[in-house]
Amino acid sequence: MAHVKSYYAATANQDLRFERLNSNIRTKVCVIGGGFTGLNTAINLAKKDYDVVLIESEKIGWGASGRNGGQLISGFSFSDHFEKKGTEKDIQNIWLLGARSADLVRDRISEFSIDCDLKEGFIDVATNRKHMDELIHRSEEWEQSGYHHNLELVDETQVKKYVNSKAYVGGLIDSGSGHIHPLNLCLGEAKAASEIGVKIYENTRAVEISAGSPAKVVTENGIIESDYIVIAANAYIGDLNKKLRRMVMPAASCIIATEPLSNELAEKVMPSDMAVCDQNTILDYYRLSADKRMLFGGRFNYSGKIPSDDRIKVEIKKRMVSVFPQLSELRVDYAWSGNVAVSLKKIPQLGKVDKNIFYSQGYSGHGVAPTHMAAKVIADAVDGDDEVLNLLSSVSHIQLPGGKWFSSPATAIGMMYYQLMDKLANFSR
Ligand SMILES: Cc1cc2nc3c(=O)[nH]c(=O)nc-3n(C[C@H](O)[C@H](O)[C@H](O)COP(=O)(O)OP(=O)(O)OC[C@H]3O[C@@H](n4cnc5c(N)ncnc54)[C@H](O)[C@@H]3O)c2cc1C
């Protein structure tokens, strides 16, 4: 099993391989899923002296963690649907967890000297006045809440010093966010996990989980008996647990990588070299890679189906050229897609499906930093400190009916609705 063909797979800085599980084993904790959530939960628990086994059905970093936009953004996604069940202080505490999540990634990178092209700085850009007002409001709120990194609002003229496009009426710069090569971060974390004692098996799919003490994870070639199980399969959970699958809506997100820009063109188009996202629900996100390719991502397919790489090349290039007409002549070298797990209330879903079976999922396309915080919360809970987990899991999660999300009419209608809302907002710009 290989990683999907992408710029990241082509520039992976190590070729890590782990054997397949071929026997029955006993452990203290079994983590299912070799992305950021699973690896970091495993690292945190191994550091607390737990025996940890991590199984991955494909390869480490095969899922969203090894193929995302690489935008390292502080903060959890909150939506208006977020129902608070706790006090104002509880909500402030949840907010702080999100605000500190990118710092955890930086700590991880320096703790294990992970080479993953970390660059600092992120700008949220507004394509219309309504979005700019939202950014102004957010900046005020974050500053009042004690955000510990610098925030700076920029207007229509100033924004061009950071992102040289006519598409934007302003933006909010966050010095506490940035960008990374996600697959190299993931591989670096897997190497670190393995070096501190986590036993990793690739090409090992969990096909069934049975509750109990110990609980059991059945794989194709062996059964793992474990005191605790952590499910970290996110959008790729498939049939492993129907309840968790129904709590999220997988949606495809697509990325292209162009040929490298000349230094002059890179400096002209993206003078700040920051990560960039717009405020639309069906958003554009982009950044320059270490070798100055434009990595431009977004969604264009509202059917809920995964598009072909050739279509991604054409459609995402159109979006990129609408933002940067200066890039119309660039060749597109790579195109790929992956699934994000959208939770209807947008906030990540953490909790338990049984007394010793934990899960974290539903980062709604914004998971690079939050997965690292979720992994800390889950590891603390396994270790007996479940205060934060209980707070987060008190957010009631909506379960969606049906099962086949990828071709679901509900997904398509939802996406069409959001596309229409984006268009209306930009129309009135
Ligand atoms: C195209 C794309 C762009 C994105 N861009 C950004 C971005 O720029 N910034 C940002 O913050 N977020 C982004 N995201 C979201 C972010 O990548 C995810 O939220 C995050 O990586 C989720 O990590 P995870 O470990 O929970 O899941 P994953 O990385 O998906 O890992 C889950 C793993 O579980 C494995 N698995 C599933 N079922 C089983 C099983 N039964 N047995 C064993 N293993 C199993 C899968 O193979 C997979 O490797 C993007 C996502 C995509 C797809």
Image (cartoon, rainbow, N blue to C red):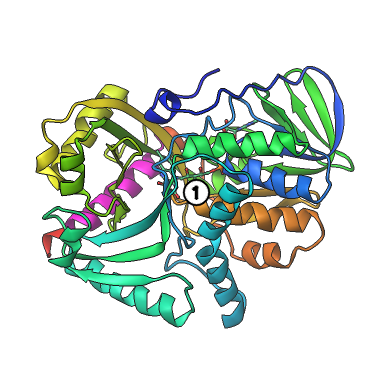
Q: Quadrant of the N terminus?
A: top right
Q: At x 23% / y 27%, what residue is drawn?
A: 332
Label count reads 1
| Image location of residue 101, percent across then percent down | 54, 59
| Image location of residue 364, percent across then percent down | 45, 51
As drawn, 385 above or below 341: below
Does residue 384 appear in this view?
yes
| Image location of residue 184, percent across then percent down | 51, 35
In-front residue for pair 233/174:
174
As drawn, 97 above or below 327: below
Q: Is residue 167 left or right of residue 69?
A: left
Q: At x 16% / y 41%, what residue is drawn?
A: 265
User: What predominant SS class does the magenta segment belong to?
Assistant: helix
Q: Residues within 10 Å of mark 1 (few under 14, many from 20)?
A: many
Does residue 64 appear in this view?
no
Q: Which residue is mark 1?
A: 368
Q: Is residue 49 left or right of residue 111?
A: right
Disc 1 under 8 Å from ligand 1? The reply is yes
Q: Quadrant of the C terminus?
A: bottom left
| Image location of residue 319, percent across then percent down | 19, 41
Q: Is residue 2 left or right of residue 228?
A: left
Residue type for callout 1: Val
Task: Residue 144: name its quadrant.
Answer: bottom left
In-front residue for pair 247/123:
123
In-front residue for pair 257/110:
110
Stretch of the chain drawn in magenta: 407-425
As drawn, 93 above or below 162: below
Q: Secondary structure at mark 1?
A: helix
Q: Is residue 408 magenta?
A: yes
Q: Is residue 413 magenta?
A: yes
Q: At x 61% / y 55%, what residue is drawn?
A: 374
Task: Residue 236: name its quadrant.
Answer: top right
